[in-house]
Image: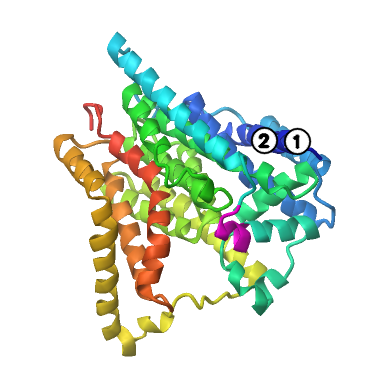
């Protein structure tokens, strides 16, 4: 098949995921902007498409475009038949009209974000995906699933495949295998279109949520800032989990922001968004479960004077789906130990070894990584000082806690902790940046009620 034909079939697969996701998410996205609905549609659609792939594998059928289309059509039809559009709750005030100068600024920022997205699109689609993480585990697992039409036990039991990180979540490999089924072959270059699609809806979610909750200008600034995060949105990250994970983090922060505002009674739709976003994050990366749990803790603390029932529902929505996901993974692959981490350091007999290791890692993070980003960090600190409290400020501690957990993980590395920091810290931190930009821009022209 020609490259153009492969691109067209991958686009068909993405459109199919988007369409079925729009049908399913229709029940819990009432009152959101169209841009937000687009982001929720793709995230939900990727979950549904991966589930359809697993159903075909469980039935012993070969995953093909026709089979996937039939299953996804059944899911979409059932969702449209059973679901009813929810009335938007907690939508916020309609953004005021902009003056001519501000309108031009918003348009300019949107053009800038679009141009940056095109750069990533061209870079990602110009060559086959070549990142080490893609070749070693994300793409490797997806290719094995696609070629074998199964999820072989050897992926989790063969000692020779330890390099493939068998403990990682499987949504990215399943999504790549599902899109490859639409193509009919494994085409690394065409499959890369998944990543620009994820970036695009991430930018749409940022601008749509902030326009609805804060202002059009805040939404445009957040989208432009995220699009210019070239260390995240670069061809080297096509084939990994960072770009889809950034989408998941943005969605869970948007859902948490709607819950925090509480303009009206807590609806089933807002709780459903928390559950879907938390589940999506957990299915992408291990730290997605951690982020969902930290968001749950932040919501529990910041709404401690609110009625108990909504708080319990929010906690359940953020804790139960990721926990169910990990239980399902345990049943699929069994207990998977990591030789990357020396867990004996948490035993009482070795507790005294932890503080020096943690101090070493912290010194590297602050002395090398932070120093290289000193200008950006100073700008963020100044911005926090001169702006008033925003609607998403209760989520700020979550990012610090996530970084602290990263530092602890580096400290117990079985290899050199400095190697772990140098090799992974900047990459995993960059996946947090779009969600952090969302929280920061929630402070700009914040509604008076906050």
| Dot 1 alpha-carbon crowd within 10 angstroms: few under 14, some 14 to 19, many 20 or more | some
Determine whether label 2 and label 1 are within 8 Å by CB: yes
Q: Left or right of 168: which side holds 433? A: left
Q: What number is the disc on residue 73?
A: 1
Residue 18: horizontal and vertical position, in percent?
A: 63, 34
The answer to whether residue 32 is visible is no
Left or right placement of residue 123 versus residue 258 in this view? right
| Residue 136 highlighted magenta (yes or no) | yes
Q: Earlier in the sequence, mark 2 or mark 1?
A: 2
| Figure check: 268 above or below 311 | above
Residue 30 in sight in this render: yes
The residue tagged 2 is 20
The residue furthest top is 100
For mark 1, give the secondary structure: helix
Residue drawn at point x = 15 percent, y = 40 percent:
385
- Of all residues, the one furthest to the bottom in this rendering is 349
Residue 441 has which mark? none
User: What segment is highlighted magenta in the picture?
Assistant: 130-138
Query: Does the stretch in magenta take in 78?
Result: no
Q: In the picture shown, does residue 237 fall above or below 133? A: above
What secondary structure is found at the residue carrying circle 2? helix
Q: Determine whether, in the image, residue 412 is placed left or right of residue 191.
A: left
Determine the residue located farthest toward the front in the rendered image: 127
Q: Where does the N terminus fall, quadrant-wise?
A: top right
Q: Position of residue 342 (x, y in %)?
A: 43, 80
């Amino acid at each position: 098949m020609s490259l153009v034909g492969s691109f067209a079939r991958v686009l068909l697969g993405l459109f199919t995921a988007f369409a079925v996701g729009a049908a399913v998410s229709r029940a819990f996205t009432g009152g959101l902007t169209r841009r937000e609905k687009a982001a929720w549609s793709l995230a939900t659609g990727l979950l549904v498409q991966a589930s359809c792939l697993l159903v075909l594998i469980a039935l012993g059928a070969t995953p093909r475009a026709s089979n996937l289309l039939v299953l996804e059509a059944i899911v979409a039809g059932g969702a449209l038949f059973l679901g009813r559009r929810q009335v938007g709750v907690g939508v916020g005030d309609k953004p005021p009209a902009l003056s001519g100068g501000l309108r031009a600024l918003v348009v300019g920022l949107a053009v800038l974000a679009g141009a940056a997205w095109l750069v990533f699109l061209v870079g990602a689609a110009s060559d086959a995906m070549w990142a080490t993480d893609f070749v070693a585990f994300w793409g490797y697992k997806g290719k094995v699933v696609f070629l074998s039409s199964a999820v072989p036990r050897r992926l989790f039991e063969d000692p020779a495949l330890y390099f493939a990180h068998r403990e990682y979540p499987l949504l990215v490999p399943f999504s790549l295998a599902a899109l490859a089924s639409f193509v009919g072959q494994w085409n690394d270059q065409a499959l890369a279109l998944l990543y620009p699609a994820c970036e695009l809806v991430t930018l749409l979610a940022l601008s749509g949520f902030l326009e609805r909750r804060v202002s059009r200008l805040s939404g445009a600034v957040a989208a432009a800032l995220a699009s210019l995060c070239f260390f995240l949105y670069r061809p080297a990250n096509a084939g990994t989990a960072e770009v889809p994970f950034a989408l998941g983090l943005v969605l869970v922060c948007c859902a948490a922001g709607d819950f925090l505002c509480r303009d009206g009674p807590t609806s089933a739709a807002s709780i459903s968004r928390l559950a879907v976003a938390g589940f999506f994050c957990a299915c992408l990366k291990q730290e997605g479960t951690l982020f969902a749990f930290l968001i749950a803790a932040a919501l529990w603390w910041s709404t401690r004077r609110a009625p108990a029932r909504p708080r319990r529902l929010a906690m359940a929505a953020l804790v139960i789906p990721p926990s169910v996901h990990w239980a399902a993974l345990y049943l699929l692959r069994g207990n998977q130990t990591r030789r990357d981490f020396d867990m004996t350091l948490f035993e009482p007999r070795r507790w005294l070894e932890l503080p020096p290791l943690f101090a070493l890692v912290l010194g590297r993070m602050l002395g090398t990584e932070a120093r290289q980003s000193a200008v950006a960090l100073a700008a963020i600190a100044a911005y926090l000082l001169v702006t008033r409290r925003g609607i998403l400020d209760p989520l700020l501690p979550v990012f610090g806690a996530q970084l602290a957990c990263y530092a602890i993980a580096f400290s117990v590395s079985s290899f050199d902790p400095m190697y772990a920091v140098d090799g992974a810290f900047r990459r995993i931190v960059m996946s947090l940046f779009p969600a952090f930009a969302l929280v920061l821009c929630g402070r700009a022209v914040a509604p008076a009620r906050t």
